[in-house]
Amino acid sequence: MEETTVDAHTRKLAGWVIVAIGAVIVLVGALADQIGLGEDEGGGFGGRQVAAVIVGLVVAAIGLGLALWQPGSREPTTAAQSEP
């Protein structure tokens, strides 16, 4: 099997696209009543809106982590090294 590697630029771009998708989900969830997608049960913030906002925030956080993650930037720990 061949390993596929993704260069840093592509990974960052994909991360920012995922952040944008998460932000759109958050906005649609938060503004569902105003744009006509919400339930007409008194104009309050419904359970589906809360779920959409939470899912959008999680998606955005994953995208942000992907965009800002730098593989190989970790320093080796000194605890594993033994002194002679």
Image: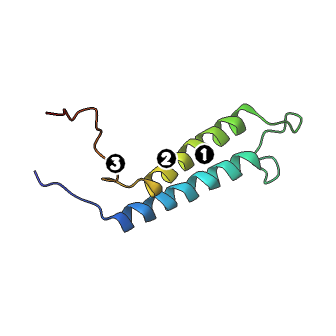
Q: Residue at x 64, y 41 (%)?
A: 52
Name the spot of residue 2 as percent of width and height, x first.
Answer: 12, 55
Instruction: Examine the rendered structure and indicate whether residue 18 appears above or below residue 57.
Output: below
The one nearer the camera, 62 or 69, is: 69
Q: Which mark is residue 74?
A: 3
- As shown in the figure, which amino acid type bears the numbered disc 2? Ile
Q: Which mark is residue 79?
A: none
**Do the residues bearing badges 1 and 2 touch, measured as CB atoms within 8 Å?**
no
- Along the horizontal axis of the image, is 78 left or right of 14? left
* Residue picked out by circle 1: 56
Instruction: Examine the rendered structure and indicate whether residue 22 appears above or below residue 58.
Output: below
- Badge 3 crowding class, 10 Å Cα cut-off, few under 14, some 14 to 19, many 20 or more, is few
* Residue picked out by circle 2: 62
Closest to the camera, between mark 2 and mark 3, is 3
Q: Residue at x 50, y 55 (%)?
A: 18
- Badge 2 crowding class, 10 Å Cα cut-off, few under 14, some 14 to 19, many 20 or more, is some
